[in-house]
Image: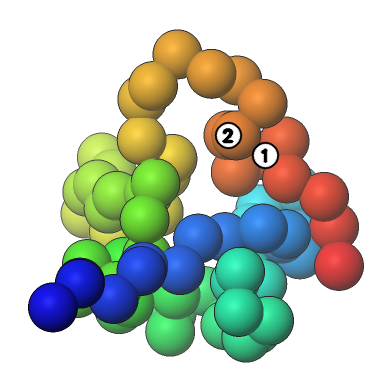
Amino acid sequence: MALPTRETFIAVQKNGDGDLTAFKTSSGRVLNYDDALKEVQAGAIAGVNVFKGRDGEFYIRGDADGDPTNNLDALPFF
């Protein structure tokens, strides 16, 4: 039995400060930041991970694979 394919983020929304606020997945779902964070922590989204910032908050970032074209900031807007 094959493992289910994990979704990926294909587009983002940002606020006026350039902070990521929402994500569109490869299946077309739209997740606000908090919901996306929970799904990344649960391992449901491929190509990203969660890190704890200096401020103690948790943030989503792309996996370090040396390819700048798939960085979250490089994704198209929706």
Q: Residue at x 73, y 59 (%)?
A: 11
The circle drawn on residue 71 is: 2
- CB atoms of marks 1 and 2 within 8 Å: yes
Residue at image point 36% right, 56% down: 46
Q: Residue at x 52, y 74 (%)?
A: 33
* x and y, in percent, of residue 52 in the image: 22, 48
Q: Is residue 61 visible?
A: yes
Mark 2 is on which residue type?
Answer: Asn
The residue labelled by disc 1 is 73
**Mark 2, other Cα within 10 Å: few <14 / some 14–19 / many ≥20:** some
Residue 38 sits in which quadrant?
A: bottom left
Quadrant where the C terminus sits is: bottom right
Quarter of the image where one finds residue 20 = bottom right
Residue 50 appears left or right of 32 = left
Q: Nearer the viewer, residue 37 or 27?
A: 27
Residue 13 is labelled as none
* Disc 1 residue type (three-letter): Asp
Q: Residue at x 60, y 43 (%)?
A: 72
Where is the N terminus found, in terms of image quarters? bottom left
In the rendered image of this protein, does residue 34 appear above or below residue 17? below
Distance from the alpha carbon under mark 1 to that under mark 2: 5 Å
**Direction from residue 12 to residue 40 in the image, left or right:** left
Q: Secondary structure at mark 2?
A: loop
Horizontally, is 38 left or right of 47 in the view?
left
Tell me where residue 75 appears, x and y as whole percent. Answer: 73, 45
Q: Residue furthest top?
A: 66
**Crowding at mark 1 (Cα within 10 Å: few <14, some 14-19, many 20+):** some
Is residue 41 something that shows in the picture? no
In this rendering, the count of numbered labels is 2
Q: In this orientation, which residue lies closer to the viewer: 8 or 40?
A: 8
Front residue of 60 and 18: 60
Local SS, label 1: helix
